[in-house]
Amino acid sequence: MQVPFDDYVWSAGVTTDLVNTMPGVWRGIDQLPDRDALRAFLDEHGLGGVPAVDVAGVHAVRDRLRPLIESADADERVAGATALTGAIGHVTLDGDEWVAVLPEDGGVAEVLGVVGGLGLLAVQRHLGPERFRPCSSDTCSGVFVDTSRPGRRRYCMPGHCGNRVNVANHRARRRGAAT
Ligand SMILES: [Zn+2]
């Protein structure tokens, strides 16, 4: 099993989406409750070859990743992310891309741990610690890794949280105009 090694826009994006499936972001309803949901998540994120078996293991990896995004301590983030990359067997060129190769017995939790660890390390190194942020929506407890070029992303799920805020602002303005 292998995953891209140095495509941190991809790996940090997978990581953001993964931590925002946690029940705390969705009023207690887990967005990765079972193998079917995990299968769909993997397919959506270019990880179609990874077996969607170990749902509990993925939940555990998710629980490790979120505090690393939330942490204000860069050393803590680096140490935690490095630990998650421990499942890498070796790194090699596949065509013109670097890939991390995991042992064949590595499961989905190891794969997502490696992807998350690599993403956090690369963003910390190349873009800096201010790229790890909470969602700006008052009604959302999500977090995200901002890999946008300008670095001014505000929402963990831009199409979702951004819209919720816009709708709320719009309603507030209408209420204001009516009184
Ligand atoms: Zn959000």
Image (tube, rainbow, N blue to C red):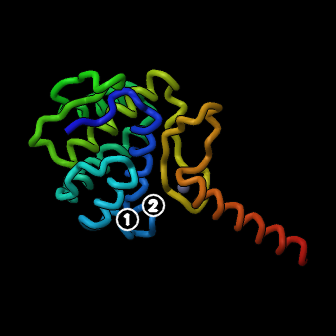
Q: Ligand 1, what quadrant?
A: bottom right
Residue 25, which numbered label?
A: 2
| Residue sitting at x 61%, y 42% | 153
**Is residue 77 toward the left or the right of residue 111 in the image?**
right
Q: Quadrant of residue 75?
A: top left
The amino acid type, in three-letter code, at marker 2 is Val
Q: According to the image, label 1 marks what residue?
A: 31
Query: Mark 2–mark 1 contact, CB under 8 Å?
Result: yes
The crowding category of the residue bearing disc 1, from other C-alpha atoms within 10 Å (few below 14, some 14 to 19, many at least 20), is: some
Residue located farthest toward the front when viewing the structure as drawn: 95
**Is residue 33 toward the left or the right of residue 140 in the image?**
left
Quadrant location of the C terminus in the rendered image: bottom right
In the image, is residue 65 above or below residue 100?
below
| Residue sitting at x 61%, y 31% | 149
| Residue sitting at x 28%, y 22% | 93
Q: Position of residue 44 (x, y in %)?
A: 39, 54
